[in-house]
Amino acid sequence: MNKTLRLRLCLLFSVSLICLSGFSADPQIGYVYPAGACRGDTVTAVFGGQALWSVNEVLSSCEDIEAEFVDKANHRSPRSRRVYMPLVRARHKGKSDEHIQKLRKEMLKKEGRKEGDWYINRIEKMNKKQFQHFVEAAVRLNRLQRTNQIDQKVIAKIKVSEDAAPGRYQLRLRGRNGITNPVVFMVGVNKEFREYEPNTREPRKGDVLQHPAVINGQITPGDVDKFYFNASKGEKLVIKTQARTLVPYLADSVPGWFQAVVSVRDQAGREAAFCDDFRNQPDPVILFDVPSTGKYTLEIRDAIYRGREDFVYRISIDKSPFVQSVFPLGAEKGGKVRAKLEGWNLPAKSAAFNSTDECGVKADYIRKAGLISNQFKYCVGRLPEMVEKETPKNSPQAVELPITANGKIAAGGDVDSFSFNAEKGRSYVFEVWAARLNSPLDSFLRIKNKEGKILAFNDDSEKTRTGMITHFADSYLVYKAKQSGTLFAEITDARGEGSSSHCYRLRISEPMPDFKVFTDRSSSRHNLGDYQMLKFSALRKDGFDGAIEISVSNEKSGYSLEGAVIPQGKDCVFATLHAPAKPAERLAELEFIAEAAAGGRKIVRSVTPADDTTQAFVLHHLVPAEAFLAELRGKGRRVFPVSVESKEPVKIVEGRGGTVSIKTAGHLRGKYGSIILSKKEGPEAIDYANIIPKKNGYDIKFRAREGIKAGDKGNIILEAKARIKPRKKDGKVNTWNLGCLPAIRYEVVSGA
């Protein structure tokens, strides 16, 4: 065998291994383009992701959005090239549009495809420069850098009902290897356009946009997209970009999102407006007071000229209402409050809060002439509320606890001060809500005594990384009074800024123990009766450190949790989700509830479904999803019933170990051969030792090493494989993955 042939065989074998490993991975979506549509429109969208080879269905979080799977396509793949290369040749030879349309139908039919992707469907409609760009980007593959996370493509038709409420929704893909993470899909009210590359040229007739309009586009490396619009002097236009809103985090890029930069130039090429972020949000917003009537150029690019297919954006240009500030930023539950609004194009200067619902963060919009404002947020709380009054020389304002004070840092250097009576030995919590409610305030909080001595201070307070927050600008501290007397809480802006928009809410009270719980993924896929590992993370508040019990609230689904108790003092637990043993609804939306006791009261909270998402290679965030979906395989194998004999935690003796007994229906050894167990999750200092068969089950022994102390509690998750009996012909031994065993709860006890 010559060297060349050996090299080719090695490469073929390597590619085969990569393909097989990709088939076993969970499907993931990196983006959808376009990432939105107008009410009443139908769009052809492309999903980019990985492990999408089995996808055959699109799931929508809204009944008013119908999503239909069309095909899998990638214009880098041989299958797609076999379709569009004849079309490219026909276009290059100057064939008629009718000829190309007929040829496209023939090639798609030949390849067994229902429909082509966006580019294939538009080859005959492209102008000369657009066609040249397509050839450069799609045909000459050596000029493109492939990104595995978004390399596979799925085409779908998305139809939005005319009755759909404008706002943010989620789409997922579903196939034989599971359900993907959700991606954001926006529904708007303005006419929508899609960019055509290249669009860095001077506009042709008909290329000038008439607002109101929404532009959908993608940024490629070094790309600067240009759009042209007419505006009249005195118009107050809101030019709002959505980029990070659509794709919150990028795992393999720094910074970990598309950092859009937007500018507006006049006919002379002079920069009339510029924005690279809006307050605490990376997505730019330009409030453009049109200086003169004429044609303007809107430009968008990445801050450091990066780009790829998941650098997706939406830009709206209109005269919609835009809320810049809300004051106060909340209300007591049941209270009647009309908040003062500031912004552009507002139909009214105030809005009533809905304070009758449950306590927490609320969101609302302002509507005007069919247009909808940006989202503004406010809090509904349980404590009495007050509004800070301007006092001479920033003298302190006396308050009675507990209280939530609403105020604003009206000018740079302004300091608001509140005085209260403290009792020796009592703890007091000081919590600011500002940046989390879209206020530009970067709070700085300090506690002083009568002599002016600083007893405690805080600038930023990092919490569990959930949602879109990466800068934890809201201050938080707990102070235990060393003596009785008057204390002073002072709040200011850490950057020395101030305005009528720098609003805040300051809670001063004794600790109010509470918590939130999140999952680490928003879907799971099961065989009948099997167990899948699921992580629950807790965000503890005001010193709460008690145990948190989690369960499935909709028991009729047939699903249950094993080991779903976050131990006292810990922030997470790995549990197992048990699927029904009998065939049930193939796709179920599960709801989890978390319960705990604190301060003599029972706390019950809904668990937030979320996906563990990576930012810039290292950081991880829990991005909330609208629902948790559990799927049963249609023809999946039934898992042999397994359960832990005792409901009490297994005792692990320090320095020695412990044993847990599991029950099985029948004997696995006779059915499958010997069983191989491996630890999938659990403390490093507790090792799986061996498994001993017994009647109707097994004893599993654990070994404890140094580094684990008495009192530690948690779960151990074991994964089981069966070693199948050797084949008669070749004697090879195969293994069969049996999945996870139910979570095994443990408690470390002293060996003394």
Image (tube, helix red, strand yellow):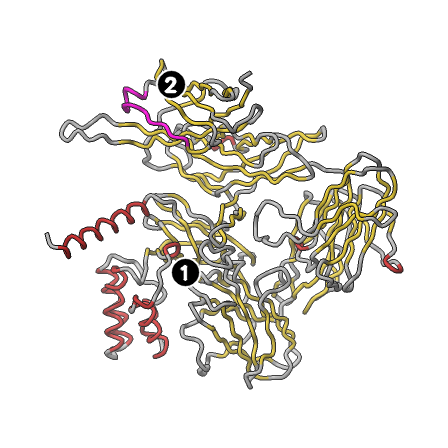
Dot 1, how many residues are within 10 Å of its Cα: few (below 14), some (14-19), or many (20+)? many
738 to 507, vertically: above or below: above
542 to 470, vertically: above or below: above
Q: Residue 738 appears in which quarter of the rendering?
A: top left
477 to 529, vertically: above or below: below
Secondary element under disc 1, as helix, strand or loop, is strand
Residue bearing the label numbered 1? 45
Asked if marks 1 and 2 touch (Cβ < 8 Å), the reply is no
- Image x and y of residue 220, in percent: 42, 67
Dot 2, how many residues are within 10 Å of its Cα: few (below 14), some (14-19), or many (20+)? some
Q: Which mark is residue 698?
A: 2
Of residues 711 and 207, which is closer to you in this image? 711
- Image x and y of residue 699, in percent: 40, 18
Secondary element under disc 2, as helix, strand or loop, is strand
Q: Is residue 669 magenta?
A: yes
- Describe residue 236's horizontal placement relative to residue 714 as left or right: right
533 to 149, vertically: above or below: above
Type of the residue with mark 2: Tyr
